Amino acid sequence: MSKQINIVSTKKLQPIQRQLLSDAGISVLEEDFIETKIKNFELSKVNENLIFTSQNAVQSILQHPKCDELKGKSVFSVGMKTKELLTENGFDVVAYTGYASDLAEIISLVYATDSFTFLCGNLRRDVLPNTLNENGITFNEIEVYETNITSKKMTSKKDGILFFSPSGVDSYFKLNSIKDETCFCIGETTAEALENKKAKNIIIAEKPSVESVITQVIEYY
């Protein structure tokens, strides 16, 4: 590697993740561009099946005093890490996918006569509820956490930027712009958010995980 590669991560990394980049000779500047916090919420009017599309929603439910009452319900989830967290804590995950659009399709095709409760955050994407509505599926939503934008101005020279959610993309663009930096994304939904901001060089991780994003960065450089 002839020159120092500098990248920005829009979320703080784990020490082992940071070490992988360092071992590859890549310098990373990390900032949390979004923050999540648990909300007070009522677990009333919960339908027969639960939908989770993020680990944040699971963490929030796990801290609710009525959490154990939900463990008899069937769960539908987006993301391997979300599924693992649910399974580790005694939930029965009957279906999971990498993307909300795929999960909405499975529910619409196979479970259309069932009822669902979507446990989500305040900045949740529209794709899943829109699809369920279009297909006449009975569901409601309970907001169990909130995401706050914590944008920072980044002035240092960077070769690449790591993005992990559409909210992180929105936060970054609040105070920053992109010229010719390569953007590494955790998944297609995040990449779509970048395309809407006219970003050109976009690389999507093979799996929707932080580790997979880092692997792509190392392979690229």
Image: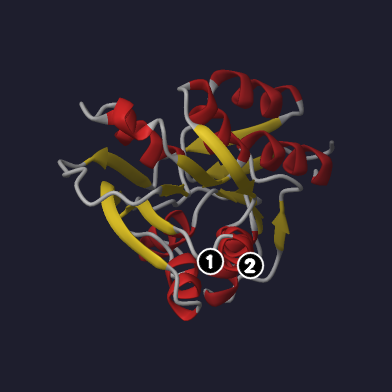
Task: State left or right for residue 196 relative to residue 24.
Answer: left
Circle number at residue 109: 2
Q: Residue at x 62, y 66 (%)?
A: 105
Quadrant where the N terminus is found in the figure: top right
Between residue 188 and residue 4, name the one nearer to us: 188
Amino acid carrying mark 2 in the image: Leu
- The x, y position of residue 205, in whole percent, is 72, 49
Q: Secondary structure at mark 1?
A: loop
Circle number at residue 142: none
Q: Is residue 173 visible?
A: yes
Circle number at residue 112: 1
Which quadrant would residue 7 be assigned to in this image? top right
Q: Indicate the colouring scheme.
A: secondary structure
Which quadrant would residue 118 be assigned to in this image? bottom left
Amino acid carrying mark 1 in the image: Ala
- The x, y position of residue 52, in whole percent, is 45, 46
Q: Is residue 13 visible?
A: no
Task: State left or right for residue 184 relative to residue 215.
Answer: left
Looking at the image, do the residues carrying marks 1 and 2 touch, with CB atoms under 8 Å apart?
yes
Q: Which residue is situated farthest in the front direction here? A: 113
Query: Counting other residues with Cα less than 10 Å from the Cα at mark 1, is it few (<14), some (14-19), or many (20 or more)?
Result: some
Quadrant where the C terminus is found in the figure: top right
- The x, y position of residue 162, in whole percent, is 59, 48
Q: Residue at x 76, y 48 (%)?
A: 206
